[in-house]
Image (cartoon, rainbow, N blue to C red):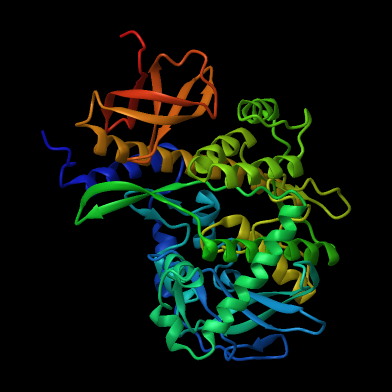
Amino acid sequence: MSNSPPPAARNQLRSIARHAMIERGFEADLSPEAAREAANLHETTLTPSATIRDLRTLLWCSIDNDDSRDLDQLTVAAPADGPGATKILVAIADVAATVAHGSALDKHASINTTSVYTAAQVFPMLPERLSTDLTSLNEDKDRLAIVLEMTIEKGGRVQAFDVYRAIVRNHAKLAYNAVAEWLEGRGAAPAKLASVSGMDAQIRLQSQVAQSMRALRHEHGALGLETIQARPVFENDALSDLLPDEGNIAKQLIEDFMVGANGITVQFLVKHGFPTLRRVLRSPERWSRIVDLAAELGEKLPNEPNATALEAFLDKRRREDPTRFADLSLSVVKLLGRGEYVLEMPGQTAQGHFGLAVKDYTHATAPNRRYPDLITQRLLHAALDGSKSSYSESELSALATHCTQQEDAAAKVERRVAKSAGALLLVNRVGDSFEGVITGASAKGTWVRITRPAVEGMIVRGAEGLDVGQRAQVTLVSANVERGFIDFARVGAAS
C-alpha cells in the first residue's frame, strides 16, 4: 500500500483552509471596495524633506524566510560614539503612509487583524499588491520607512534611541538558512551577500551586536526556548512531508533587533504622552506544572513564577540534552500560555512580557501582516507630526481585545489546516507506532506531538495520568483529512 498522499492535496487543503477561515470569522477575500482601492494604488516618487531623511546609500538588507515576499523590515549597523558602541537601525515599511485609517483596505485589515499562514496558502492581511509590492521593502526599490535607531553599548544595553521617517533601499534580500550556514562556517557566503561590497562585514557586525543584546536579556531572565514549527513540503501539488523548521543564528539576529526596536517604540510613544498597545505575557498560571516538569528532570524551581530561575534551568537542559530540548521548549511554551494585546494609557504601570523579560514591549515591526503594528505605526506618525492620535481610548481598548481574539482564531485556523495536512500524510499509516511528547492535557482531552511527520493529534485511549511534557509511545488509530482529526492510542491501552 502506498504512503503517498493524493496528487490533489494542495487544492483539497486550500478548500479546507478557506472553510476554516470563514468559520472563524475571517474575510477570506477582499471586498469589492478594498479591491478597487488596491488596484488604484501606484508607486509615487519619493522626495527627501526636512522630516524625511535620505538613507538609501546605507547598506540595508533584509533577512527572512526563503519564500518571504512581504518584507517588513531592513537592518543596518553603523559606528557610534563611545568605546565599542554601535548604532543599529531598523527600517519598518511605512504602511500607514499608504493605508488610510478608515479606508476599505483598513476595514478589511481591522477585521482579520493578521495574515494567516496555512499549510495550503497564505491569506494576507493586506492584498499582495501592497504587502509584496508597494509597501514591501523589496530589493533595489526605494521605499518610505519609519526608522527605529538604537545605540547599543558593548555589553548589549540600549544607550540611546531615536525614531524618524526616511527613504531606504534594500541592497540585498537574504534568507535565514543561507546566512546562518555562512555565519557558522558551514557554507559559502550567499551570492546576494557576496555581490554587495562591505555586506559581509556588515552582517558579521550585526550578528555580534545581536548576540550581546541576547546575552543581556537572558541575564535578566529572557527564556531561550527553541520551538519547532512544521513546514509543508510540496512536490508539484502533492504534499510530501511536514518538516521541522528550526531556529538558527540568523533568525536570532532579527529576533533580537526586533525585541529592541519594539521596546524603543514604546518608550518613544510614552515620552510623547501617547497610549501604547502593549504585547504582554503574564506570569504563567500553570507554573506548578513547570515546577513538576523540572523536578522530573532532577531540577528544582521556586514555587512562585521566576523567569531568571526558569531560564537557568532551560539553559542547563539545552547543554545537557540538546536532542530533546525542542520537546522541553514546546512543553514550557504550552504551559506559559499565550500573549495578548493590552492598552496602556500614559501614567499606567507596564505589565511586561514574562518570556522576554522586558517591561516595555509592543508589536511594531510587521505592519504588512499584523494590525496592531499598523495601529502603533499610526500613533508614531502622530507623535512625529506633533498631532493627536486618531484613535480614542475606547477604540484602542476594543481593538486590543479584538486583535487578541483574532490572533487566537488565526492560530486555530493554522492548526486546523496543519492537522488536515498531517492526516494526509498519515491516512495510510493506521496501526504504526510513534514516540511523542504530550503538548496538552485538560478536561477537553490530551494531545501528543510526533516528529516525523511533525503533527499533533489526540490520545483517544490510554491518556489517563499523562501531563504536558511527558513522553509517550502511541499508535495511530485513525486519520480524517476533511475533519483534521488525528487520533492515537497509548501503546498498551485496551481497545
Residue closer to the observer: 410 or 206:
206
Q: Is residue 151 left or right of residue 60?
A: right
Rendered location of residue 310, percent (x, y): 70, 40
The residue drawn where x is 82% and y is 61% is 270
Residue closer to the observer: 209 or 355:
209
Answer yes or no: is residue 327 visible. Answer: yes
Rendered location of residue 386, percent (x, y): 80, 74
Answer yes or no: is residue 91 visible. Answer: no
The quadrant of the image that shows the C terminus is top left
Give the answer, above or below, for where 413 lies relative to 120.
above
Q: Is residue 69 left or right of residue 480?
A: right
Question: In which image quadrant can residue 313 be found?
Answer: top right
Residue closer to the observer: 194 or 418:
194
The residue drawn where x is 48% and y is 43% is 323
The residue drawn where x is 54% and y is 63% is 249
Give the answer, above or below, for where 308 lies relative to 467.
below
Rendered location of residue 146, percent (x, y): 65, 75
Q: Residue furthest left?
A: 1
